Amino acid sequence: MRIHLAKSAGFCFGVRKAITTALETAKTKKPVFMLGDIVHNEEVVKQIRDIGIKKINSLCRGKGKTLLIQAHGSPRRTLTQALKLGYQVIDATCPMVKEIHRIACNKESHGNQVIIIGDKKHDEVQGIVGQLKSRVLVIDRIQNVPLTKIKKIKKAGIVVQSTQNLENVLDILKLLRKYIPKLTFHNTICNPTKTKQNEVKTMPLKNTLMIIIGSKTSANTKRIYEISKSLNKNSYWVNSAREIKKVWFKKAKSVGITAGASTPESSIKAIIKKIKTITF
Ligand code: SF4
């Protein structure tokens, strides 16, 4: 059985940069804290914890402490509050996410209703919402477009969560264009996501089986899995070698493997090793 590993499998540059920043920050003598997880992957979070960086749920007295901002960014008020409380803030926000912040603020300052196409509860979307003074509309899928509100908007600027599925975005955009007279659209899906999604549009058609590696909390892995599953029903989403089942490979001639942007190389290697053990 042949194994094809996607070129784009695993860490994107934003995650790599955030992890490097975390490792560097941990070398300083000050205690380091994170609000939430630095990236959405349990193994990476454990590694970060093991080097002494502690996860917290809310800010407290920050004198003598360092606060690390996660790769997905955070609301502006978090930074302001942290500085007020005395933390030294180290910002590991991905540059592509910062660019979304910049565009959204610019659109708002020019009198646009800002609309984000993305998942309301995701850290990245909350971070974008938290850059703006006015009320933002967040739309995750075409079924949830609030038409009554949309029909009242005269001028809108649209940005997209960096890991969204392009097809979903274009469907929503098509509907919004029908009702909003002045609309500017910024496709802020990041390049690593575009590359991953492009690869997963052909791999499931060329392989009998697809394995998608990543945490169940990772939004971009979920999207890759959904695309793969829609093209090849023999698509499986796993986070560790333990989840691999021999029965999946019974009739498989080739397996395509890809992994989300926050999946470490060690997970990918362990899964390939397990597949080789049970199939060769
Ligand atoms: S997925 Fe894109 S936006 Fe998110 S950290 Fe990676 S490069 Fe940055």
Image: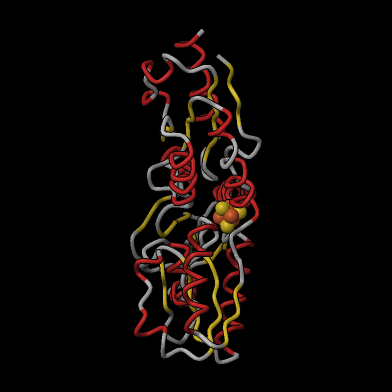
| Residue ID at (66%, 35%) | 7
Task: Give the total number of marks visible in the rendering.
Answer: 0
Which residue is at a point 62% across and 62% down the rendered structure image? Answer: 96
Instruction: Name the side, left or right, on which 133 lies relative to 247.
Output: right
Spot the residue most to the front: 178
Please name the residue shown 47% across and 73% down the image: 175
Counting from the top left corner in percent of width and height, residue 217 is at 39, 47
Image-quadrant location for residue 6: top right
Quarter of the image where the N terminus is located: top right
x, y percent for residue 45: 44, 44
Image coords of residue 244 (percent x, y) = 39, 23
Which sits in the foreground, 136 or 4?
4
Rendering quarter of residue 118: bottom left
Ligand 1: quadrant of the figure: bottom right
In the displayed structure image, the side of residue 42 where residue 30 appears, left or right: right
Name the residue located 47 percent from the left edge and 61 percent from the top edge: 65
State whether residue 122 is above or below residue 222.
below
> Residue 216: horizontal and vertical position, in percent?
38, 43
Q: How is the image coloured?
A: secondary structure
Q: Nearer the viewer, residue 22 or 224?
A: 224
As rendered, which of 257 and 268 lies closer to the eye?
Answer: 257
Pick the residue in front: 73 or 54.
73
Up/down of 269 relative to 220, above or below: above
Name above or below for residue 132 compared with residue 255: below
